[in-house]
Image (cartoon, rainbow, N blue to C red):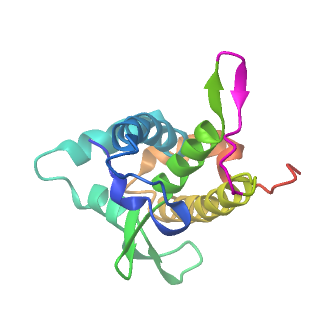
Amino acid sequence: MATIDSTYFFGNTHIPQGSATGVAGSLQLLIDSKEPELLEMLFGYELYKAYTTGIAAGSPDAKWISLRDGKEYTNRQGYLTKWKGLKFTLGTSKKSLIANYVYCEWMSQNATASTGTGEKVPNNQNAENSTPAQKIVTAWNEMVKWNLELFEYLLSNQTDYPEFLNYYGRVPRNIVAPINTLSI
């Protein structure tokens, strides 16, 4: 079961989902495929499997709820801090590093339309041509910041998440690398 749903896509990560657009089903399919991909890249397979099994339990252990929903903790430098969680609210807004990842994938996949003669950029009447690059960069870099916060939480709580310590050195570096519109 996915951690997020379509209600996480608004504001800077808005994906139009009106009934006329037919997007809801496609978006849910993307969430269902990209969330496990991201979590396995972040956690490693062993912790990912333990997390999904733990969350699926009728009464999940507190460590799995804390990983998903956030928790105050003392970091490795001895400072009290807060892990926001894989999903959290900011005021009344739902936020998630997962939603940012899915948003970047959605925008990348839908920036062009596939036709019989190749990929085409839609050309709407009376609209300026633009690319989604800046919005993708903003969403990606926000996700990278949250990924680094996740790693600090996991490393500061090694007794709860020992599987991560063995995986940490193998985390794909692209998942923690900021991007820019110039690809440099």
Q: Is residue 13 above or below residue 125?
A: below
- Answer left or right for 38 relative to 183: left
The residue sitting at the top extreme is 116
The residue sitting at the left extreme is 58
Residue 94 appears in view: yes
Whether the magenta-drawn stretch holds residue 124 is answered as yes
The location of residue 140, given as percent across then percent down, is 64, 56
Q: Is residue 97 above or below residue 38?
A: below
User: What segment carries the magenta color?
Assistant: 116-127
Question: Between residues 20 and 28, which one lies in front from this camera angle?
Answer: 20
Q: Quadrant of residue 178?
A: bottom right
Residue 86 appears in view: no
Q: Residue at x 67, y 50 (%)?
A: 125
- Answer left or right for 33 relative to 125: left
Question: Between residues 31 and 158, which one lies in front from this camera angle?
Answer: 31
The location of residue 117, given as percent across then percent down, is 72, 17
The residue sitting at the front extreme is 125
Q: Is residue 162 above or below residue 75?
A: above
Q: Residue at x 75, y 54 (%)?
A: 130
Q: Is residue 81 above or below residue 129?
A: below
The location of residue 35, given as percent across then percent down, is 43, 42
The location of residue 100, given as percent across then percent down, is 53, 56
Q: Quadrant of residue 173?
A: top right
